[in-house]
Image (cartoon, rainbow, N blue to C red):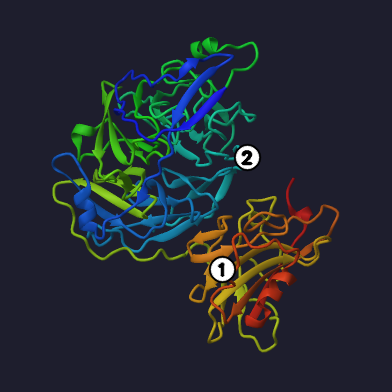
Amino acid sequence: MLHFYSLFMISAAAISAPFALSAQPQGTVGEYSDTIITGAILEPSPKRPDSDSALLDRFQLPEGVTASVFARDLVNPRMLAVSEDGTLYATRRSVGDVVVLRDDDGDGMADEPVTVASRPGMHGIAFHGDQVYLATVNDVYRADVAEDGSFGALQRIINDLPDGGQHPNRTLLVGPDDKLYVSVGSTCNACSETNPESATMLRAELDGSSRTIFASGLRNTIGFDWQPETGQLWGMDHGIDWLGNDAQIEELNHIQQGKQYGWPYVYGMDEFNPQDNPPPGTSLETWASISEEPALGHTAHAAPMQMIFYKGSMFPEWTGDALVAMRGSWNRRPPSGYELVRIDFEQGQPVGIEPVMTGFLADDDGAWTYAGRPVGVAVGNDGAIFVSDDSEGVIYRIASGDAPPNGQQAGPVPNVLSPPPASSPAIETLKPEAALTVKGPFSAHAAIDLEYTADGENASPALSWEGVPEGTQSFVVISEDPDAREPKPFVHWLAYDIPAEVTALREGFPTELSLPDPEGVKQGRNSMGSTGYTGPKPPVEDGAHRYHFQVFALDIPSLDLPLPPTVLRSSRQWKDMFSQAVRLSAPLIGTRNCGEVPL
């Protein structure tokens, strides 16, 4: 039986030796385990210094290396990538988009960021020539990159990656063999997966075809890259939780085709997980014998995120070494991670790990606090290193010599993604005298594009509206199917508490109750019972259904509903809640026939 205890005081040294062993729990481990494991839940609290200068002074960097704020107020920047022309891009998982960050005036800070793609759960990003590849939980997209840095139409080339579970953050890269590599994390901490593609590295052609499992037994390898001298693939895998403060080490693996790396039954240097037994007829010893051991270990629970091999000229002594962002622990005492580290490679092999950027984490008289959580890392064409902090919405630039001057701060991220076509006028309004009009990516009473349907990408369409009356304090958007059988009408989307200054919603909204961008927007449950948008899917035997995308201008700033709001069976009940506050309303009506969806 496995027992868990809360551990309040323990000291531990960081593990960063090539063959470091993690602590083995007490008791027997095997088919009939009897062991006691102590663990801790310690989540440091955020505490950011009052100014950038105070924050930058807090960082410890190698001699001759400086850090500066490149961009701020980005909400949740995660994975970073640099295109061939040196332009920096960041994905924002909680917002569900990709932003482009330029420094055209050369002041060392990003100019006005621009949203260039949007889908719920957008996370992985990689460039290959003049094309970009993007990954959400279940999908992979490809798009052309224009000269101005914007993306063309998203083409979905994979639509059936495993569901996310505990590790939904997909990452991807194009390898030196011109194949697409996609990392898929496990759905759980440690368990026997039902989908063979979970906890694997996948490989496919650049069009998404011919997908195979390249390597397995990888719990959650978010960061991976190819060592430039040898062309070999390396990745940092997240260790299992609840094995103790010093187990499981974070693993650096040499990822090879057809190999498996132990999870969930074996971890570290052939240590046995006492919680799970391998399939019948297979012993832990057998599983260990067919599993690859890590080449290097790092402190348990440090949470390795993006990893890249340095190929720039600014730090020639780091050429061929790997940089890894460590987001930081939540179940270790003392905490680990919260730093950028460098993996030293000599003659193509890893020999040690050392810090590059620390100071995010602090022990304030026994109360642990953090000033940021590093996630993404990328190298610019000039050799400078970019590091994203998804908790404070900041991207740092690490360079040699003096830090660049702080110029104009980056402003709010404008939404220029998929603007509704000017040729799509709204149809009749609900009030004859109303001037409010609604526009979308389809013409009134025309077929709704496949990407906005449940059988397509299930992405919410971009909407905008104009003719807002004076005194409007907020908006509500409701999408419904009045031709549904039960419930009637069927509610497909409810977004409310939309601030009065927001008159457009980008496509591909995340399916969260509360959204960080636009700030304050909330989403209710649809008639399917899920949160946010669910696309049209009329019954096969029906003809075309009408779908109303309605915008309501209210004279109150908020509906003041608890989260999650009560599930209501029809939009009429929602409308009754704010009927006295409606100033103007107008719909855009599109149609969808199930027969139009290719099988």
Which residue extends farthest bottom?
A: 433
Lateral position of residue 283 relative to residue 376, left or right: right
Dot 1: within a 10 Å radius of its alpha carbon, few (fewer than 14), some, or many (20 or more) residues?
many
Q: Is residue 291 visible?
A: no
Residue 355 at x, y percent in the picture? 25, 35
Coordinates of residue 59 in the picture (x, y in percent):
22, 46
**Relative to 172, residue 292 above or below:** above
Type of residue at label 2? Asp
Identify the element where label 2 is drawn.
loop
The CA distance from mark 2 to mark 1 is: 29 Å
Residue farthest toward the right in the current orientation of the protein: 541
The answer to which image quadrant residue 224 occupies is top left
User: What residue type is disc 1 on?
Assistant: Pro
Quarter of the picture containing the N terminus is top right
User: Residue at label 1?
Assistant: 420
Relative to 138, is 568 above or below? below
Sooner in the amino-acid sequence: mark 2 or mark 1: 2
- The quarter of the picture where the C terminus appears is top right
Can residue 97 be seen in the rendering of this structure? yes
Neighbours of disc 2 within 10 Å: few (<14), some (14-19), many (20+): few
Q: Quadrant of residue 466?
A: bottom right
The answer to which image quadrant residue 293 occupies is top left
Report which residue position mark 2 lands on: 160
* Residue plotted at (37% across, 49% down): 45
* Front-lying residue, 368 or 231: 368
Measured from the top left, where is residue 51 in percent x and y? 24, 60
Label of residue 527 in the image: none
